[in-house]
Image (cartoon, rainbow, N blue to C red):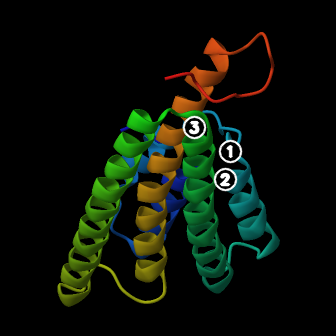
Amino acid sequence: MKCISLPCRHVLAVGVLAGWVPAMLVQAQEAAPEPEASHPIEHKTDSCMEEGDWTTQAMHECAAQAHDDWEEEIQRLTMMLERVLGSEAREALSDAQEAWRSSRDADFAFISAYYAQLYRAELSGGTLGPLAEQLFRNAVLQDRANQLQRYLDALEELQAPSGELEMIPE
């Protein structure tokens, strides 16, 4: 498993501190170069955690803020797509967002149940378990935001001469 994104590295660090990530995995990760934040939310979260001296409380607060930021980013990207898509594609996007929200809720329920089982088995606990749980939730949101951004990027490539995204003729 190659962990290159900042959220993935945060989860790995939390797992090591909690004692539920094998040392072999950590050694493999140490050889990988440190990635740069590829999205402003990743950069903001990383900076927030650094400013908080990587204390568990600060990291949890930063992760909670990132959750809100990713939710806002998904909404912003969805609205941008809605402005440039034709009616059929807008309707399909609306359906896709509704299905994604159901999938997101199911993923969040799984993450909660997974960590509840770890807590009961005493494999995770203390203050790091909730942080890892939050980081996994954030990864679900980040994946969707990245997917929506790829759709916008593709449209911008098609409309490159004007420089601005315009509504696509139906």
Say which element carries label 2: helix
Label 1 neighbour load within 10 Å: few <14, some 14-19, many 20+: few
Which corner quadrant of the image does residue 158 belong to?
top right
Between 135 and 10, the residue placed more toward the observer is 135
**Which-is-in-front pick, marks 3 and 1?**
3
User: How far apart are the alpha carbons under marks 2 and 3?
Assistant: 15 Å
Location of residue 145 in the rendering, given as x and y in whole percent from the top left corner: 53, 48
Q: Which residue is mark 3?
A: 149
Residue furthest top as drawn: 161
Say which element carries label 3: helix
Q: Which mark is residue 39?
A: 1
Location of residue 159 in the rendering, given as x and y in whole percent from the top left corner: 68, 15
Q: Which mark is residue 91?
A: none
User: How far apart are the alpha carbons under marks 1 and 2?
Assistant: 5 Å
Mark 2 and mark 1 in contact (Cβ < 8 Å)? yes
Q: In this view of the protein, can residue 5 be seen by the observer?
A: no
Comes first in the chain, label 2 or label 3: 2
Residue depicted at x 59% and y 23%: 155
Type of amino acid at the residue the image marks with label 3: Gln
Looking at the image, residue 90 lies above or below residue 52: above
Residue 145 appears left or right of 166: left
Residue 66 appears left or right of 140: right
Which corner quadrant of the image does residue 98 belong to?
bottom left
**Which-is-in-front pick, marks 2 and 3?**
3
Q: Which residue is mark 2?
A: 42
Location of residue 40 in the rendering, given as x and y in whole percent from the top left corner: 74, 50
Comes first in the chain, label 3 or label 1: 1
Label 2 neighbour load within 10 Å: few <14, some 14-19, many 20+: some
Type of amino acid at the residue the image marks with label 2: Glu
Type of amino acid at the residue the image marks with label 1: His
